[in-house]
Amino acid sequence: MESKPLIGRPVLRKEGRSKVTGQAKYIDDITMPGMIYGTTVRSSIARGRIKGIHFEGGIPWNEFTIVTSKDIPGENYLALILHDQPFLADEQINHPEEAIVLLAHPDKYLLEEARRCVRIDVEPMPAVFNLEDSLAKKEIIWGNDNIFKSYLVEKGNIDTVWEKADFIVEGEYHTGAQEQLYIENNGMIAVANPKDGVTIWGSMQCPYYVHKGLVPLFELPPEKVRIIQAETGGGFGGKEEYPTMIAGHAALLAWKSGKPVKIMYDRAEDMVATTKRHPARTRHKTAVSKDGKILGMEIEFVIDGGAYATLSSVVLSRGTIHSAGPYFCPHVRIKSTAVATNMPPHGAFRGFGAPQSIFAQERHLDKIAKTLGMTPEEIRRRNFLHKGQTTATGQTIEENVDMDGLLSRAFKLTDYHTKKKLFAQENAKPENKIKKGIGFASFMHGSGFTGSGEKFLASIVGVEATPQGRVRILSASTEIGQGTNTIFAQIAADALHLDYEDIDVVQPDTATVPNSGPTVASRTVMVVGKLVETAALGIKQILIQSGHLQKTHTAQDFKRACKEYIDQLGPLKSFSQYKQPPGINWDDDKYQGDAYGAYAWAVYVAEVSVDTMTYETRVDDFVAVQEVGKVIHPVLAAGQIEGGVAQGIGYAIYEKCVWKDGRMANGQMTNYIMPTAADVPPIRVFFEEVPYAYGPNGAKGIGELPMDGPGPAILNAVEDATGISVNHIPMLPEDLMQAMRGSK
Amino acid sequence: MNLNEVSVQFVVNGKKQTVKAAPMLRLLDVLRENIHLTGTKEGCGEGECGACSVLMDGKLVNSCLIPVMQASGCHITTIEGVAGPDQLHAVQQAFLECGGAQCGICTPGMILASKALLEKCPNPSESQIREGLAGNLCRCTGYMKIFDAVKRAGTLS
């Protein structure tokens, strides 16, 4: 009997029951015998030299475990891409949340008191707090020139187009920092001693990143460092690289105290000290013919990386490649730079550079349309990328991309043309103080690591069968709410014609699962999910080749075959390693070639009301139409888009990081405002499914895509409503007030 | 018993509890640490996010804002007390089926807020749902699937 395919069906979330009953164990829910608590003493000065550390107040310091950089058994750097960031500042301080001293004690209330009684003498040095000053080299604070990384992408010859152009349109666009604001704060528990090595439990996206960071910190052989993911309450990129820091700190305290140590950040510490989305500035200069053809694009994209290199080079890469949008243009030059400032390092956040540069591109296209007296729709339709055309990096699009079709569908679903006309009539009446507008953005998002990234990662997934005929998936991809456990189980069950309930997804633990790469970059379904499928098929192949199973089989046949095989021959496991699909070529030096194996394509439409008395903007309706390959799980997929759109609405009109001398001044949920149930519009999600040959059952990546569209769609709608062009996000009421008053 | 501690009695999920604690200790910490009910989560510690929501005498409260003394003599329901002995509560079942839980960290509080809402108003309109859940933040779902779950729960119970 052939079982019904699970892919495409809304099976119940694997770990859903434990989540709705409160049984799921997050890191703060776990304690260990003899466990003590750890905390971090930070600089408050953005840049300077440490002159002394003083332990003051009436604190019984002899009861405390105290760790400074002098206690580090191995190397004092956080291994990621460059080795410039220390676990604990030794002498030089480069940002105001730099960790300097670690404390541990069994009483967490006394611990907090003690933290406030450590005084650090710092000789201040001049600091840089924004990308303009860093670019201008007002002070050299990193390397020789403050530059972490730059890229140059060239297609055709941009210098030849300016003369031929009927219009040259220039614009400058800014996007602010954004806090990931997962509802579970960061936390880690460590057990560490020279004999057994280091074991970590914690909230994280990437167990093997933590592993990579802790091996040199303790100078231990890799097998002596073990990283286990606890249930994780959201990540969005915020638990990609920073958890390594916290794990290192907890492990240093455990190593010195000989006791298990838990470090649990509270909300304020999590908000001010951990990473945020990179602030960015994008400049566009575009040559356009009078019939609306884009002849050439010159783009300058700059991001503020904060004090250390961390992932900025890769964030910059994705932002650079996405900056030209889903448009065909024969002549392109993109210059991009990631610069250092004395702010806490900015890091991974859903979209990873793309939301920044796509905001600029999609606002700029509306500006071009306005300049030409053309509609925003028409300028895009005349330039959309089609199959067989090349992107800015010279990648020939082999997918059956249909941006026109997505646009038409999105317009039909929103009744765009009728509304646009109606709103214009209504807005013209002076008695209408609430102006309505409709705007949209069209964009794409590459799935998986950029360029040769996946080839270098060479991820591995294992699948193991038990004598009872259950199948266990061994992968380092983490469940962080997005549905890894569920979709992996669907994919494996379908590959082996088993029931969903027959599949277990093993808790990520570096001692038992292979390195499947990090849980980032919209790669979990498309790249790792494909490995799950091939590893599962490997099990079947082993059973067929050994004569235990026929090609067509039932779930019962499979279970019997597993038992017989294991009884006779021992463990039954299959591993699958990533191999680049044929025809993908990427040149890292020239930044040319196939940047991504596949893209998700989308058109998002926002309808807004702008109150011209209070300057408040409300999003009234939001339609998200996207082509993402095969949808593995309709409810989870829609949930990803809806959540991303809500986060994108926050990015556009609510969430502002206020900075004072490099520190976040509003590190609380009371004054950093994310959308609530009362704020979000109806978010209506529609999928087009065009299967991608190298994804599991044709699936492509989906997680980051929804972060890209809301910002520009909403600000385009605000311009439609008010005629006011605001080119920075977040756009709070006071920003709009300034812009509207300035225009009068 | 520490000099600063007091003895407080209350009922949690139908079971009488006596705890010795500093009077200003947060109900959240007492539930999690003294009674080992870790389903109630801390998100912000300042009453903004609702991850620590519990029912106190049937009313939805943020347990991070309740000094334990204030809970004296009260009946508290936490997420651990929502399901029946053999089956999930309709709200839990609906969250599971509709995709109302993603990462799960806001889920206990969200389920208690939904339960409180449905007890007051068995067939809430969408605007009543939005208002009823406005004190509970979710960063994963964009709330749509949570609204679906509350509507579905109304039909299941």
Image: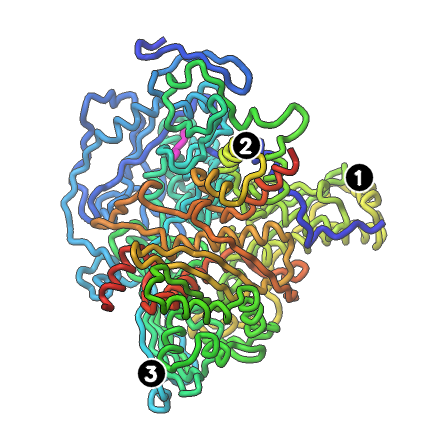
Give the residue at mark 1.
A563
Q: Are marks 1 and 3 in contact (CB under 8 Å)?
A: no
Q: Are marks 3 and 2 in contact (CB under 8 Å)?
A: no
Q: Are marks 2 and 1 in contact (CB under 8 Å)?
A: no
Q: Position of residue B27 (x, y in %)?
A: 41, 23
Give the residue at mark 2.
B115
Q: Name the kind of residue labelled 3 in the image.
A: Ile
Do we see residue A230 in this rendering? no
Asked whether A2 or B60 is in front, the reply is B60
Q: Secondary structure at mark 3?
A: strand
**In front: label 1 or label 3:** 3
Q: Name the kind of residue labelled 1 in the image.
A: Lys
Chain bearing mark 3: A
Q: Is residue A663 left or right of residue A266?
A: left
Is label 1 on the same chain as label 3? yes
Chain bearing mark 2: B
Q: Name the kind of residue labelled 2 in the image.
A: Lys
Range of residues picked out in magenta: A261-265
Give the residue at mark 3.
A168
Whether residue A262 appears in magenta in the rendering, the answer is yes
Q: Is residue A608 left or right of residue A72?
A: right
